[in-house]
């Protein structure tokens, strides 16, 4: 994913959060290999929100589906995977895959700052606003 696309998604996520009146957000956009292409921590986010957003995006990339679906897995499996990847695996809503029109995974967005459901709403709106398909799981 090109930086310009990642930045467009990030700006869209931020705009969605402000439009809905969500708490300040941390937003991480990764490419398909898990490299961070854009990140932002809005004024007023609590500490470690960027790490949580990174873990949500990483979770989606690592498993190949959105973190909402991952959250439904067996707790023992999730604990094992979290341990195996060194903690950068946050299996709750807010980690959303970014797909192109053909369904190919371009990357993922992780959002943290409000409720997990609201984090996911902002991610989906930011991805959709960039003309791409959001896969929340």
Image (tube, helix red, strand yellow):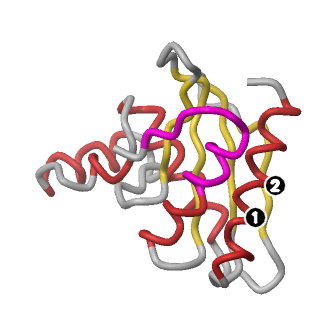
Q: Is residue 80 left or right of residue 54?
A: left
Q: Which residue is mark 2?
A: 11
- The residue to which callout 1 is attached is 14
Mark 2–mark 1 CB contact (< 8 Å): yes
Q: Is residue 66 above or below residue 26?
A: above
SS of the residue at dot 1?
A: helix
Q: Is residue 33 above or below residue 38?
A: above
User: Picture quarter containing residue 14?
Assistant: bottom right
**Circle 2 residues within 10 Å: few <14, some 14–19, many ≥20:** some
C-alpha gap between disc 2 and disc 1: 5 Å
User: x and y percent of residue 51 in the render?
Assistant: 61, 61
Identify the secondary structure beneath mark 2. Answer: helix
42 and 82: which is toward the camera: 42
Left or right for 69, reference 61: left
> For the point 67% across and 79% down, which residue is it?
47
Q: Residue at x 81, y 55 (%)?
A: 11
Number of numbered labels in the structure image:
2
Q: Which residues are magenta?
A: 123-135
Horizontal and vertical percent for residue 71?
Answer: 26, 55
Is residue 127 located in the magenta-colored stretch of the structure? yes
Q: 107 and 90: which one is in front?
A: 107
Residue 73 % position (x, y): 16, 49
Residue 116 screen position, x and y as percent:
44, 70
Label number found at residue 118? none
Relative to 52, residue 110 above or below: above
């Amino acid at each position: 994913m090109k930086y310009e696309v990642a930045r467009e998604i990030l700006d869209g996520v931020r705009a969605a959060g402000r439009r809905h009146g969500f708490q300040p957000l941390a937003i991480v956009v990764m490419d398909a290999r898990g490299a961070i292409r854009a990140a932002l921590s809005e004024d007023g986010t609590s500490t470690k929100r960027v790490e949580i957003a990174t873990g949500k995006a990483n979770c989606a990339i690592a498993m190949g589906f959105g973190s909402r679906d991952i959250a439904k897995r067996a707790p023992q499996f999730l604990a094992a995977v979290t341990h195996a990847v060194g903690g950068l695996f946050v299996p709750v809503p807010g980690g959303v895959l970014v797909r192109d029109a053909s369904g190919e995974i371009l990357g993922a967005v992780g959002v943290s700052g409000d409720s997990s459901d609201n984090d996911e709403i902002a991610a989906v709106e930011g991805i959709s606003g960039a003309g791409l398909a959001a896969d929340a799981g």
